[in-house]
Amino acid sequence: MNNKNSQLIEEFLTYLSLDRSLSPNTCDAYEADIHKLLDFIEGKDLVSVTSEDISLFIRYIHELGLNPRSTARIISGLKTFYKLLITQDYIEQNPLQTILTPKLPKKLPEVLSHVEIETMLAAIDFSKISGERDKTVIMLLYGSGLRVSELVNLSINDLYLEDGFIKVLGKGEKERLVPIGGKTIKQIGLYFQYYRNEVSNENSKNTLILNQRGNKLSRVSIFKIVKDLASEAQVKKSISPHTLRHSFATVLIEAGADLRAVQQMLGHESITTTEIYTHLDKAYLKSVIEQYHPRS
């Protein structure tokens, strides 16, 4: 890759990180999509890309069998990239100006029933030291609706257990307070007593969720915990840690929790993102966590 293209990509990533406050994972995805285009145009300058180049590139990734959702994400990312080049006077016209982003059907998220969650919790092996940690992971994902990135970055100082809240740093570096119920608070106490106090060391610092070496538990490890417990519980659905977040939102909406309260707890910037869960029940009641959530 020539120096000019490297410079443009670096400026774009800086813009995404600082101006848009996007997470490192999102920035990595944007960068990977630009590299897909670079591989296709075989070293051509990014500022010289034409609408015809883009059309051929989209046809190419379609022929590779990329699904419409991934294609839409790539087009959206490239549009953002070239809009930035226009504002910085590198180019005069966006080569994606006439390119339409595929319209995607609204896909309802996969959710787990409360029985399936309980079956997963029952599958935890408490003869292992990791048992209390794994239960804490599931209860924070399902009981508070956290994203994986939010969970792994929680610190002890983020816990306000006496007040029944945890402080979460979400997308765009935005902080929010999320209610935490009595059952989860009790589980966090057990986690400290039987796991964290045993594995923590000088490397642990203030990190809440640790692996058995006393370091921050990775995103990959949390995926594995959820997948393994689902398999042990014979849950046949295709799930991930995010499925527990969807399930958290769904159980509250089903019970009639206020939509804006759920939006705030999930850290959704727009309430339209939260509205996807209202396919189940649209009743509005005052109590949100303690009254309605079975694992709170």
Image: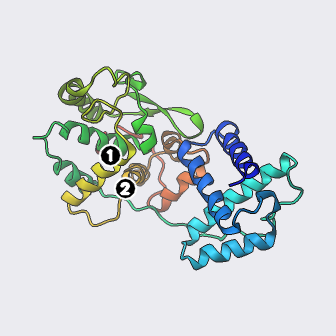
Q: Position of residue 195 (x, y in %)?
A: 21, 30
Q: Position of residue 7 (x, y in %)?
A: 73, 45
The residue to which callout 1 is attached is 221
Nearer-the-camera pick, 3 or 208: 3
Q: Position of residue 196 (x, y in %)?
A: 25, 27
Task: Give the SS element for disc 2.
Answer: loop
Name the front one of labels 2 and 1. 1
Nearer-N-terminus badge (2/1): 1
Q: Residue at x 84, y 47 (%)?
A: 87
- What numbered label is drawn on residue 174? none
Extreme residue toward the bottom, this view: 63
Nearer-the-camera pick, 283 or 71: 71
Mark 2 is surrounded, within 10 Å at the Cα level, by few (under 14), some (14 to 19) or many (20 or more) other residues, namely: some
- What numbered label is drawn on residue 240? 2
Q: Give the position of the C terminus as an image quadrant.
A: top left
Task: Report the side of 138 relative to 190 (left or right).
Answer: right
Circle 2: residue type: Ser
Q: Is residue 100 above or below residue 89?
A: below
Nearer-the-camera pick, 19 or 248: 19
Q: Is residue 27 above or below residue 82?
A: above
Q: Position of residue 79 (x, y in %)?
A: 73, 58
The answer to whether the residue labelled 2 contacts the one labelled 1, judged by CB atoms less than 8 Å apart, is: no
Mark 1 is surrounded, within 10 Å at the Cα level, by few (under 14), some (14 to 19) or many (20 or more) other residues, namely: few
Circle 1: residue type: Ser
Task: Give the SS element for disc 1.
Answer: helix
